[in-house]
Amino acid sequence: MSDDLTKEELRAQTERGSRLDTEKQKQDEDTLSNAILAELDNIDSGEKAKTLSVRDGNLAVILYALEERDEMAEIGTQLQKELGRPLDSDAVTRSAVLAMAARIGLQEAAPEVVEAAKEAQKERVSQRF
Amino acid sequence: MPDTMRAAAFLDKGGVGKTTAVAHLGVALANDGYDVLLVDLAGKQGDLAKSFGLWETIRNQDDDWPNVSTVFDENWDEIARKFDDALDDLIWETGEGPDLIPAHEGLDTLDSELNNIEDTEERYSRLDQFLDNHIDEKYDVVLIDLPGLTNNVTYNGIWATQNIVAPIRPGPFEADQIESLEDDIELFEDTFGMEISIAMLLPNEVDERTTIGRKYLEHFESHYPETVGEHVPKSEAKQGVQGAQEAGQTVFAFPEEELVATGERARDAYTANARQLAERLGGQNE
Protein backbone atom coordinates (compact mmCIF):
# COMPACT_ATOMS: atom_id res chain seq x y z
CA MET A 1 0.00 0.00 0.00
CA SER A 2 1.22 3.45 -0.77
CA ASP A 3 -0.12 6.32 1.28
CA ASP A 4 3.23 8.05 0.85
CA LEU A 5 3.08 8.16 -2.92
CA THR A 6 2.58 11.52 -4.54
CA LYS A 7 -0.06 11.96 -7.21
CA GLU A 8 2.64 11.91 -9.87
CA GLU A 9 4.07 8.68 -8.50
CA LEU A 10 0.64 7.07 -8.32
CA ARG A 11 -0.03 7.99 -11.88
CA ALA A 12 3.38 6.81 -13.13
CA GLN A 13 2.89 3.48 -11.37
CA THR A 14 -0.50 2.82 -12.87
CA GLU A 15 -0.17 4.07 -16.42
CA ARG A 16 -0.40 1.19 -18.85
CA GLY A 17 -0.06 0.98 -22.59
CA SER A 18 -0.65 -1.92 -24.92
CA ARG A 19 1.51 -5.01 -24.88
CA LEU A 20 3.52 -3.55 -27.78
CA ASP A 21 4.03 -0.28 -25.91
CA THR A 22 5.30 -2.20 -22.91
CA GLU A 23 7.74 -4.18 -25.06
CA LYS A 24 8.97 -0.99 -26.70
CA GLN A 25 9.35 0.66 -23.30
CA LYS A 26 11.33 -2.35 -22.12
CA GLN A 27 13.61 -2.04 -25.12
CA ASP A 28 14.09 1.69 -24.45
CA GLU A 29 14.78 1.06 -20.76
CA ASP A 30 17.45 -1.49 -21.72
CA THR A 31 19.26 0.94 -24.04
CA LEU A 32 22.59 0.41 -22.32
CA SER A 33 22.10 -3.32 -22.50
CA ASN A 34 21.27 -3.05 -26.20
CA ALA A 35 24.29 -0.84 -26.75
CA ILE A 36 26.54 -3.34 -24.99
CA LEU A 37 25.02 -6.09 -27.13
CA ALA A 38 25.92 -4.11 -30.23
CA GLU A 39 29.47 -3.61 -28.99
CA LEU A 40 29.83 -7.36 -28.37
CA ASP A 41 29.16 -7.81 -32.07
CA ASN A 42 31.76 -5.18 -32.87
CA ILE A 43 34.38 -6.93 -30.73
CA ASP A 44 33.60 -10.31 -32.24
CA SER A 45 33.85 -9.02 -35.76
CA GLY A 46 37.14 -7.29 -35.02
CA GLU A 47 35.69 -3.89 -35.74
CA LYS A 48 36.68 -2.74 -32.31
CA ALA A 49 39.73 -3.71 -30.24
CA LYS A 50 39.54 -5.72 -27.05
CA THR A 51 42.48 -3.78 -25.67
CA LEU A 52 41.89 -0.64 -23.67
CA SER A 53 44.62 1.65 -22.40
CA VAL A 54 44.60 3.73 -19.25
CA ARG A 55 46.77 6.80 -18.81
CA ASP A 56 47.08 7.27 -15.10
CA GLY A 57 50.50 7.87 -13.58
CA ASN A 58 49.36 7.34 -10.01
CA LEU A 59 47.82 4.00 -10.91
CA ALA A 60 50.89 3.00 -12.91
CA VAL A 61 53.23 3.52 -9.97
CA ILE A 62 51.08 1.24 -7.79
CA LEU A 63 51.29 -1.57 -10.31
CA TYR A 64 55.03 -1.10 -10.86
CA ALA A 65 55.57 -1.23 -7.10
CA LEU A 66 53.46 -4.37 -6.72
CA GLU A 67 55.43 -6.04 -9.52
CA GLU A 68 58.72 -4.93 -8.01
CA ARG A 69 57.77 -6.42 -4.64
CA ASP A 70 56.35 -9.56 -6.26
CA GLU A 71 52.95 -8.87 -4.66
CA MET A 72 50.94 -8.69 -7.85
CA ALA A 73 49.80 -12.31 -7.58
CA GLU A 74 48.53 -11.80 -4.02
CA ILE A 75 46.56 -8.66 -4.97
CA GLY A 76 45.28 -10.45 -8.03
CA THR A 77 43.88 -13.36 -6.05
CA GLN A 78 42.22 -10.91 -3.64
CA LEU A 79 40.51 -9.34 -6.61
CA GLN A 80 39.53 -12.77 -7.92
CA LYS A 81 38.00 -13.58 -4.53
CA GLU A 82 36.09 -10.29 -4.50
CA LEU A 83 34.64 -11.14 -7.90
CA GLY A 84 33.80 -14.70 -6.88
CA ARG A 85 36.19 -16.16 -9.42
CA PRO A 86 38.33 -19.26 -9.01
CA LEU A 87 41.62 -18.40 -7.40
CA ASP A 88 44.45 -18.78 -9.88
CA SER A 89 47.62 -16.84 -9.23
CA ASP A 90 49.05 -17.91 -12.61
CA ALA A 91 46.28 -15.97 -14.33
CA VAL A 92 47.23 -12.75 -12.58
CA THR A 93 48.82 -10.36 -15.03
CA ARG A 94 49.00 -6.58 -15.00
CA SER A 95 46.18 -6.52 -17.52
CA ALA A 96 44.04 -8.95 -15.50
CA VAL A 97 44.53 -6.91 -12.32
CA LEU A 98 43.43 -3.72 -14.08
CA ALA A 99 40.41 -5.46 -15.62
CA MET A 100 39.30 -6.93 -12.31
CA ALA A 101 39.82 -3.67 -10.44
CA ALA A 102 37.74 -1.83 -13.05
CA ARG A 103 34.93 -4.37 -12.70
CA ILE A 104 34.89 -4.11 -8.93
CA GLY A 105 34.87 -0.34 -9.17
CA LEU A 106 31.91 -0.40 -11.58
CA GLN A 107 30.07 -2.83 -9.35
CA GLU A 108 30.51 -0.52 -6.38
CA ALA A 109 29.79 2.79 -8.07
CA ALA A 110 27.39 1.85 -10.87
CA PRO A 111 25.86 -1.59 -10.33
CA GLU A 112 23.19 -0.89 -12.95
CA VAL A 113 25.91 -0.80 -15.58
CA VAL A 114 27.08 -4.25 -14.58
CA GLU A 115 23.47 -5.48 -14.65
CA ALA A 116 23.03 -4.12 -18.15
CA ALA A 117 26.18 -5.95 -19.22
CA LYS A 118 24.90 -9.20 -17.74
CA GLU A 119 21.57 -8.74 -19.54
CA ALA A 120 23.38 -8.17 -22.79
CA GLN A 121 25.46 -11.32 -22.32
CA LYS A 122 22.32 -13.32 -21.54
CA GLU A 123 20.61 -11.99 -24.62
CA ARG A 124 23.67 -12.87 -26.65
CA VAL A 125 23.62 -16.43 -25.43
CA SER A 126 19.90 -16.80 -26.15
CA GLN A 127 20.36 -15.36 -29.64
CA ARG A 128 23.00 -17.96 -30.36
CA PHE A 129 21.03 -20.85 -28.87
CA MET B 1 -24.35 -10.13 -2.68
CA PRO B 2 -24.10 -6.50 -3.74
CA ASP B 3 -27.14 -4.24 -3.78
CA THR B 4 -26.51 -3.31 -7.37
CA MET B 5 -27.62 -5.91 -9.89
CA ARG B 6 -24.61 -7.18 -11.78
CA ALA B 7 -24.19 -9.50 -14.76
CA ALA B 8 -21.37 -10.32 -17.15
CA ALA B 9 -21.71 -11.30 -20.78
CA PHE B 10 -19.49 -14.31 -21.23
CA LEU B 11 -18.95 -17.28 -23.48
CA ASP B 12 -15.53 -18.78 -24.14
CA LYS B 13 -15.80 -17.89 -27.81
CA GLY B 14 -15.55 -14.68 -29.79
CA GLY B 15 -18.12 -13.22 -32.14
CA VAL B 16 -21.31 -14.55 -30.51
CA GLY B 17 -22.78 -11.13 -29.83
CA LYS B 18 -21.72 -10.37 -26.24
CA THR B 19 -21.04 -6.71 -26.94
CA THR B 20 -24.28 -6.24 -28.87
CA ALA B 21 -26.18 -7.94 -26.04
CA VAL B 22 -24.58 -5.77 -23.35
CA ALA B 23 -25.29 -2.59 -25.29
CA HIS B 24 -28.91 -3.47 -26.04
CA LEU B 25 -29.77 -4.94 -22.63
CA GLY B 26 -28.21 -1.87 -21.07
CA VAL B 27 -30.31 0.54 -23.10
CA ALA B 28 -33.46 -1.52 -22.50
CA LEU B 29 -32.85 -1.45 -18.75
CA ALA B 30 -32.19 2.28 -18.85
CA ASN B 31 -35.45 2.74 -20.77
CA ASP B 32 -37.19 0.94 -17.92
CA GLY B 33 -35.83 3.50 -15.48
CA TYR B 34 -32.71 1.80 -14.13
CA ASP B 35 -29.40 3.65 -13.70
CA VAL B 36 -27.12 1.46 -15.76
CA LEU B 37 -23.35 1.26 -16.05
CA LEU B 38 -21.71 -0.77 -18.82
CA VAL B 39 -18.08 -1.84 -18.41
CA ASP B 40 -15.98 -2.96 -21.36
CA LEU B 41 -13.32 -5.50 -20.42
CA ALA B 42 -13.49 -7.32 -23.75
CA GLY B 43 -10.14 -6.23 -25.17
CA LYS B 44 -8.61 -2.99 -26.31
CA GLN B 45 -10.66 -2.57 -29.52
CA GLY B 46 -13.34 -0.59 -27.71
CA ASP B 47 -16.29 -2.39 -29.31
CA LEU B 48 -18.76 -1.34 -26.64
CA ALA B 49 -17.84 2.30 -27.13
CA LYS B 50 -18.14 1.78 -30.91
CA SER B 51 -21.69 0.49 -30.29
CA PHE B 52 -22.53 4.03 -29.17
CA GLY B 53 -20.33 5.90 -31.65
CA LEU B 54 -17.95 7.03 -28.89
CA TRP B 55 -14.71 5.24 -29.66
CA GLU B 56 -13.04 7.83 -31.87
CA THR B 57 -13.68 10.55 -29.30
CA ILE B 58 -12.39 8.35 -26.49
CA ARG B 59 -9.30 7.31 -28.42
CA ASN B 60 -8.43 10.87 -29.38
CA GLN B 61 -8.73 12.38 -25.92
CA ASP B 62 -5.59 14.14 -24.68
CA ASP B 63 -5.40 12.27 -21.43
CA ASP B 64 -6.47 8.64 -21.14
CA TRP B 65 -5.65 8.16 -17.50
CA PRO B 66 -7.27 6.91 -15.37
CA ASN B 67 -8.98 4.25 -17.44
CA VAL B 68 -10.62 0.86 -16.96
CA SER B 69 -7.30 -0.91 -16.37
CA THR B 70 -6.45 1.52 -13.55
CA VAL B 71 -9.33 0.34 -11.38
CA PHE B 72 -7.65 -3.06 -11.03
CA ASP B 73 -4.63 -1.50 -9.39
CA GLU B 74 -4.11 -2.03 -5.66
CA ASN B 75 -3.72 1.75 -5.39
CA TRP B 76 -7.11 2.57 -6.93
CA ASP B 77 -8.69 3.65 -3.64
CA GLU B 78 -5.83 6.06 -3.06
CA ILE B 79 -6.08 7.35 -6.63
CA ALA B 80 -9.79 7.99 -6.12
CA ARG B 81 -8.97 9.90 -2.91
CA LYS B 82 -6.14 11.99 -4.30
CA PHE B 83 -7.56 12.74 -7.75
CA ASP B 84 -10.97 14.36 -7.28
CA ASP B 85 -12.24 13.53 -10.74
CA ALA B 86 -10.76 10.05 -11.04
CA LEU B 87 -14.10 8.20 -11.09
CA ASP B 88 -15.84 10.80 -13.26
CA ASP B 89 -12.97 10.66 -15.74
CA LEU B 90 -13.55 6.93 -16.22
CA ILE B 91 -17.23 7.22 -17.10
CA TRP B 92 -18.81 8.34 -20.35
CA GLU B 93 -22.44 8.99 -21.20
CA THR B 94 -23.56 6.84 -24.11
CA GLY B 95 -26.37 9.19 -25.08
CA GLU B 96 -28.85 6.31 -25.06
CA GLY B 97 -29.32 5.99 -21.32
CA PRO B 98 -26.54 3.88 -19.83
CA ASP B 99 -23.13 5.18 -18.81
CA LEU B 100 -20.00 3.42 -19.99
CA ILE B 101 -16.51 2.69 -18.73
CA PRO B 102 -14.83 2.01 -22.07
CA ALA B 103 -12.01 -0.36 -22.89
CA HIS B 104 -8.39 0.78 -22.91
CA GLU B 105 -5.20 -0.66 -24.39
CA GLY B 106 -3.97 -1.15 -20.82
CA LEU B 107 -6.22 -4.23 -20.72
CA ASP B 108 -3.59 -5.81 -22.97
CA THR B 109 -0.99 -6.00 -20.23
CA LEU B 110 -3.39 -6.15 -17.30
CA ASP B 111 -3.88 -9.89 -17.59
CA SER B 112 -0.19 -10.67 -17.22
CA GLU B 113 0.16 -8.16 -14.39
CA LEU B 114 -2.70 -9.85 -12.53
CA ASN B 115 -0.80 -13.11 -12.95
CA ASN B 116 1.90 -11.70 -10.69
CA ILE B 117 -0.52 -11.58 -7.77
CA GLU B 118 0.06 -14.82 -5.96
CA ASP B 119 -3.04 -14.90 -3.84
CA THR B 120 -5.81 -16.01 -6.21
CA GLU B 121 -8.60 -14.39 -4.22
CA GLU B 122 -6.78 -11.07 -4.38
CA ARG B 123 -6.06 -11.61 -8.09
CA TYR B 124 -9.68 -12.25 -9.04
CA SER B 125 -11.48 -9.86 -6.71
CA ARG B 126 -10.00 -6.53 -7.84
CA LEU B 127 -12.99 -5.59 -9.99
CA ASP B 128 -15.39 -6.64 -7.25
CA GLN B 129 -13.64 -4.32 -4.80
CA PHE B 130 -13.86 -1.44 -7.26
CA LEU B 131 -17.57 -2.00 -7.85
CA ASP B 132 -18.31 -2.45 -4.14
CA ASN B 133 -16.44 0.65 -3.06
CA HIS B 134 -17.08 3.08 -5.90
CA ILE B 135 -19.94 2.03 -8.14
CA ASP B 136 -22.70 0.33 -6.15
CA GLU B 137 -24.00 3.51 -4.57
CA LYS B 138 -24.31 5.21 -7.98
CA TYR B 139 -25.97 2.60 -10.21
CA ASP B 140 -28.83 0.11 -10.08
CA VAL B 141 -27.33 -2.23 -12.69
CA VAL B 142 -23.81 -3.01 -13.88
CA LEU B 143 -23.34 -5.04 -17.07
CA ILE B 144 -19.86 -6.16 -18.00
CA ASP B 145 -18.64 -7.21 -21.43
CA LEU B 146 -16.00 -9.88 -20.95
CA PRO B 147 -13.35 -11.26 -23.32
CA GLY B 148 -14.29 -14.35 -25.33
CA LEU B 149 -11.68 -16.37 -23.49
CA THR B 150 -10.88 -17.30 -19.91
CA ASN B 151 -8.15 -15.17 -18.43
CA ASN B 152 -7.57 -13.20 -15.24
CA VAL B 153 -9.72 -10.31 -16.45
CA THR B 154 -12.57 -12.69 -17.26
CA TYR B 155 -12.35 -14.27 -13.82
CA ASN B 156 -12.51 -10.83 -12.26
CA GLY B 157 -15.74 -10.22 -14.15
CA ILE B 158 -17.24 -13.53 -13.11
CA TRP B 159 -16.16 -13.05 -9.48
CA ALA B 160 -17.64 -9.54 -9.37
CA THR B 161 -21.00 -10.46 -10.87
CA GLN B 162 -21.64 -14.16 -10.19
CA ASN B 163 -24.24 -13.92 -12.95
CA ILE B 164 -23.60 -14.72 -16.57
CA VAL B 165 -25.49 -13.71 -19.68
CA ALA B 166 -24.42 -15.99 -22.51
CA PRO B 167 -25.43 -15.02 -26.04
CA ILE B 168 -25.49 -18.08 -28.26
CA ARG B 169 -25.67 -18.22 -32.02
CA PRO B 170 -27.53 -21.31 -33.14
CA GLY B 171 -25.11 -23.60 -34.91
CA PRO B 172 -23.61 -27.09 -34.79
CA PHE B 173 -21.03 -26.19 -32.15
CA GLU B 174 -23.04 -23.92 -29.95
CA ALA B 175 -24.72 -26.67 -27.91
CA ASP B 176 -21.21 -27.82 -26.95
CA GLN B 177 -20.43 -24.25 -26.00
CA ILE B 178 -23.16 -24.26 -23.37
CA GLU B 179 -21.84 -27.49 -21.89
CA SER B 180 -18.38 -26.04 -21.89
CA LEU B 181 -19.70 -22.91 -20.13
CA GLU B 182 -21.35 -25.08 -17.49
CA ASP B 183 -18.05 -26.91 -16.98
CA ASP B 184 -16.19 -23.60 -16.63
CA ILE B 185 -18.72 -22.42 -14.07
CA GLU B 186 -18.52 -25.64 -12.08
CA LEU B 187 -14.75 -25.39 -11.94
CA PHE B 188 -14.92 -21.79 -10.84
CA GLU B 189 -17.49 -22.60 -8.16
CA ASP B 190 -15.44 -25.52 -6.84
CA THR B 191 -12.25 -23.49 -6.77
CA PHE B 192 -13.65 -20.43 -5.09
CA GLY B 193 -16.63 -21.72 -3.17
CA MET B 194 -19.11 -19.29 -4.67
CA GLU B 195 -22.29 -19.79 -6.62
CA ILE B 196 -22.33 -18.62 -10.21
CA SER B 197 -25.61 -18.48 -12.11
CA ILE B 198 -26.31 -18.50 -15.78
CA ALA B 199 -28.80 -15.65 -15.55
CA MET B 200 -29.68 -15.86 -19.22
CA LEU B 201 -28.92 -17.85 -22.33
CA LEU B 202 -29.67 -15.49 -25.16
CA PRO B 203 -30.27 -17.12 -28.56
CA ASN B 204 -28.84 -14.55 -30.91
CA GLU B 205 -29.17 -13.92 -34.65
CA VAL B 206 -31.73 -16.66 -35.09
CA ASP B 207 -33.32 -17.02 -38.49
CA GLU B 208 -36.62 -18.45 -37.41
CA ARG B 209 -37.72 -18.80 -41.02
CA THR B 210 -35.36 -21.73 -41.43
CA THR B 211 -35.84 -25.28 -40.14
CA ILE B 212 -32.45 -25.27 -38.54
CA GLY B 213 -33.15 -21.98 -36.76
CA ARG B 214 -36.40 -23.32 -35.35
CA LYS B 215 -34.72 -26.62 -34.40
CA TYR B 216 -32.06 -24.86 -32.34
CA LEU B 217 -34.64 -22.67 -30.65
CA GLU B 218 -36.59 -25.75 -29.64
CA HIS B 219 -33.40 -27.34 -28.31
CA PHE B 220 -32.57 -24.32 -26.12
CA GLU B 221 -36.14 -23.97 -24.91
CA SER B 222 -36.48 -27.62 -23.99
CA HIS B 223 -33.06 -28.05 -22.38
CA TYR B 224 -32.79 -24.70 -20.62
CA PRO B 225 -36.38 -23.57 -20.00
CA GLU B 226 -35.53 -21.52 -16.94
CA THR B 227 -32.59 -19.65 -18.33
CA VAL B 228 -33.28 -19.19 -22.02
CA GLY B 229 -34.32 -15.69 -23.00
CA GLU B 230 -36.35 -14.51 -25.94
CA HIS B 231 -34.43 -15.06 -29.12
CA VAL B 232 -33.05 -12.10 -31.03
CA PRO B 233 -33.73 -12.49 -34.74
CA LYS B 234 -31.08 -12.10 -37.39
CA SER B 235 -31.28 -8.47 -38.40
CA GLU B 236 -28.80 -7.49 -41.02
CA ALA B 237 -30.69 -4.64 -42.65
CA LYS B 238 -29.51 -1.08 -42.32
CA GLN B 239 -32.42 -0.40 -40.02
CA GLY B 240 -31.77 -3.50 -37.97
CA VAL B 241 -29.34 -4.45 -35.21
CA GLN B 242 -26.32 -4.79 -37.45
CA GLY B 243 -27.01 -1.54 -39.27
CA ALA B 244 -27.51 0.20 -35.97
CA GLN B 245 -24.20 -1.04 -34.57
CA GLU B 246 -22.38 -0.02 -37.72
CA ALA B 247 -23.89 3.42 -37.33
CA GLY B 248 -22.68 3.62 -33.74
CA GLN B 249 -25.98 3.18 -31.95
CA THR B 250 -28.34 0.51 -30.73
CA VAL B 251 -31.54 -0.47 -32.48
CA PHE B 252 -33.41 1.51 -29.81
CA ALA B 253 -32.09 4.73 -31.33
CA PHE B 254 -33.99 4.26 -34.58
CA PRO B 255 -37.32 6.07 -34.81
CA GLU B 256 -40.17 3.54 -34.84
CA GLU B 257 -41.10 4.27 -38.44
CA GLU B 258 -37.59 3.57 -39.69
CA LEU B 259 -37.18 0.15 -38.11
CA VAL B 260 -37.49 -2.91 -40.32
CA ALA B 261 -39.52 -5.83 -39.02
CA THR B 262 -36.50 -7.76 -37.75
CA GLY B 263 -35.13 -4.64 -36.10
CA GLU B 264 -38.43 -4.14 -34.33
CA ARG B 265 -38.52 -7.75 -33.18
CA ALA B 266 -34.92 -7.51 -31.99
CA ARG B 267 -35.75 -4.38 -30.02
CA ASP B 268 -38.77 -6.06 -28.46
CA ALA B 269 -36.71 -9.18 -27.64
CA TYR B 270 -34.06 -7.12 -25.87
CA THR B 271 -36.74 -5.24 -23.95
CA ALA B 272 -38.34 -8.50 -22.80
CA ASN B 273 -34.94 -10.02 -21.98
CA ALA B 274 -33.90 -6.97 -20.00
CA ARG B 275 -37.04 -7.21 -17.89
CA GLN B 276 -36.53 -10.92 -17.37
CA LEU B 277 -32.90 -10.32 -16.44
CA ALA B 278 -33.81 -7.60 -13.94
CA GLU B 279 -36.35 -9.93 -12.37
CA ARG B 280 -33.82 -12.72 -12.02
CA LEU B 281 -31.05 -10.50 -10.72
CA GLY B 282 -33.32 -8.45 -8.51
CA GLY B 283 -34.81 -11.58 -7.05
CA GLN B 284 -31.38 -12.62 -5.83
CA ASN B 285 -31.05 -9.37 -3.91
CA GLU B 286 -34.23 -9.80 -1.91
Image (spheres, rainbow, N blue to C red):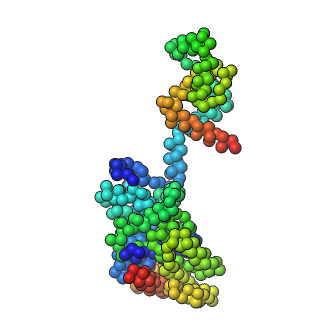
Q: Is residue B56 above or below residue B180?
A: above
Q: Is residue A87 above or below residue A70?
A: below
Q: Residue at x 48, y 30 (%)?
A: A109
Q: Report whether residue A1 is seen.
A: yes
Q: Residue B235 at x, y = what percent?
A: 52, 81
Give the tally of numbered discs. 0
Q: Is residue B16 above or below residue A42?
A: below
Q: Residue at x 38, y 58 (%)?
A: B76
Q: Residue B103 at x, y = what percent?
A: 45, 63
Q: Report whether residue B23 is seen.
A: no
Q: Residue at x 48, y 69 (%)?
A: B159
Q: Residue at x 50, y 78 (%)?
A: B197
> Residue furthest toward the top?
A68
Q: Is residue B131 left or right of residue A79?
A: left
Q: Residue B156 at x, y = what percent?
A: 48, 66
Residue A50: quadrant of the picture: top right
Q: Is residue B180 left or right of residue B65?
A: right
Q: Residue A82 at x, y = what percent?
A: 57, 28
- In the picture, the quarter occupied by the C terminus of chain A is top right
Q: Is residue A81 above or below residue B67?
A: above
Front-most of B234 and B84? B84
